[in-house]
Structures are given as structure tokens and as C-alpha cells.
Image (cartoon, rainbow, N blue to C red):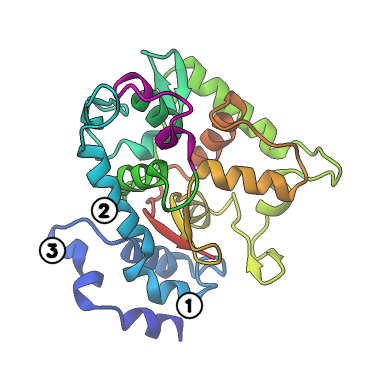
Amino acid sequence: MLKKTLLALPVVLLLADTAGAEPAPEVVLQKLIDDSNSPYLTQSQQNLIIMPDNPALFVADDGEELFKQARGPNNVSLEGCDFGKGPGVLKGAYVEMPRYFADTGKVMDLEARLIHCMTTLQGFASDDKPVKSRHGSGSDMMKLQTYIAMQSNGMPWNPSQKHPMEKALRDAGEVMFYRRAGPMDFSCATCHTQTGKRIRASVLPNLYEPQEWTKAVSWPAERVGQHNVRSSQHRLRGCLYQMRYPNIKPGSDTAIALILFWTDAARGQPAILPDLKR
């Protein structure tokens, strides 16, 4: 039934990658399903049906306009921002993040790097709305993140591990992923190291199944139950809240370490950007 549903998608979408264009996110997902038949990847037929009309695509369109628009007190665009491949180069940048940036001396994810460029290049203050408002489809931050991330759709996750700080944070993230703590004595591994495990109706992704894990870490993504596009930082905060952990500071070394470990676990698998999730 599921495969018949997907085969009903427009032929132009299913064959996009054969025509020399970048494959659409639903094409990337379909290949993962064909290769793995994972219960996690196939759990929501409704989501798969509407992926070609993912609301996140419209958010990305808005993000492209913001990226190229001269803004802020300095009246410049973000085309001068270096996301790891040179100023303004977006293709393939997101799947190599978090990464070390010499100009800040820090390992940064996309959100942290955007904040850096919006405050240093464009001159926004940290409490200006374009920088401070970071969640929801209507925020500049989510529009920009969705557009930038989308330029890496279908490319393999390949976070840099060349710098000692990148390796250190990746290893710290692994320790935190498996560390049981909090009032419920949970760790990330409690939910994400078994195939087919559920919370209520939702099948959970297994870290040890890379074809599942690539979808799990493919953010930004539209959360259909929330009617908003969400980021990796938002998902991290949500997971820790469910585990009854204290709030985590966005952009902190702790947050970056966990996201770097997550991303490294999906290494070599294609990113689905933007994704659409429950």
C-alpha cells in the first residue's frame, strides 16, 4: 500500500534526479525506504503523500529572499557569510556542520553561525527580533536556516573532524548521548538504540540504523502536529524536556556536542532537507 501511494507522486518529482537536477526530498526518502523497509521511515503514509507540498518549501523561499536582502544597521546581505566553504557558498555546507570556524575559535552549528553573521556582518544586536526570535516558521531564523540547509538536500552527512575541537566535542556528545541522568534516569540511548521501539503511536529512530538516523537528524523539518518548521536546536530542547532534563542553552558547547554526535552517526547517508515529520 505504501509503495503504491508513493508511486502516485508526480513522475517529474520521482525522476528529478535522473534529469540532472537535485533529487527532491521525497525522492531521497523513497530510496532509503526501498533500501531498508524501515518501520520508522514508513510509519506515516500521510506525511509521505504531502511531502511534495511540504510547507517548509515556502519557508525556504522566504529564507532565500532574506539571505540576499541587504539588512540590518550595516545594510548588507548574508552573501558575505562564510558557512565553511567560503563567503556565500551554501551548496554542501550544511551537511558538514557543526564545524570549527577559525574566525570565532569555536565549533558552531548553523544557528550559531547565522547569529554570528547577522550580528557581525549585518550589525544586528543580539536582542533584535531577527536574531532573538529563533523558533517557528514566521521567524527570520527558521526561514534562513531552512533555505541554507536545503542547499545540501540529498548530500551525505560529512561533519568535519579535522580540528581537535571538533573531535573533542563529537566525543563529548557521545558520552552525553549514553549518559543516564535526571529524575527519570533517561539517556538519549534509552529511546534511540532499538529498532521498532515506540512512544505511543510513534516509531522511534535507531542510532545504529544509519538509514533511519539520517531522517531523524534531517532538520529543519515541518512538524505537521505543530504547523511549524523546527530546527535541530529546537528538537534537542524538546528531547531533553521529555527526559525532564533542565533547559539547555542554545549554541552552548553542550548543545553543539550533542548535535555533532547526532550528525556524525548519520555520516555517509543522504540528508532529507527540508524534511516533514510527525
Give residue 154's position: percent from left, percent from top: 31, 52
Whichever of labels 3 and 1 marks the residue nearer the N terminus, that label is 3
Label placed on residue 61: 2
Whichever of labels 1 and 2 marks the residue nearer the N terminus, that label is 1
Q: What amino acid is labelled 2 in the image?
A: Asp
Please tell me how crowded label 1 is: few (under 14), some (14-19), or many (20+) other residues with Cα within 10 Å.
some
Q: Nearer the viewer, mark 1 or mark 2?
A: 2
Which residue is labeled 1 in the image? 45
Task: Give 40 or 137, whichever is nearer the viewer.
Answer: 137
Q: Secondary structure at mark 2?
A: helix
Q: Nearer the viewer, mark 3 or mark 1?
A: 1
Q: CA distance from mark 1 to mark 2?
A: 26 Å
Q: What amino acid is labelled 3 in the image?
A: Ala
Q: Quadrant of residue 67?
A: top left
Please tell me how crowded label 2 is: few (under 14), some (14-19), or many (20+) other residues with Cα within 10 Å.
some
Image quarter (top left, top right, bottom left or bottom right) of the C terminus? bottom right
Q: Quadrant of residue 19?
A: bottom left
For the point 37% across and 25% down, the residue is 124
Judge whether residue 72 can be spotted in this image. Answer: yes
Give residue 104's position: percent from left, percent from top: 41, 14
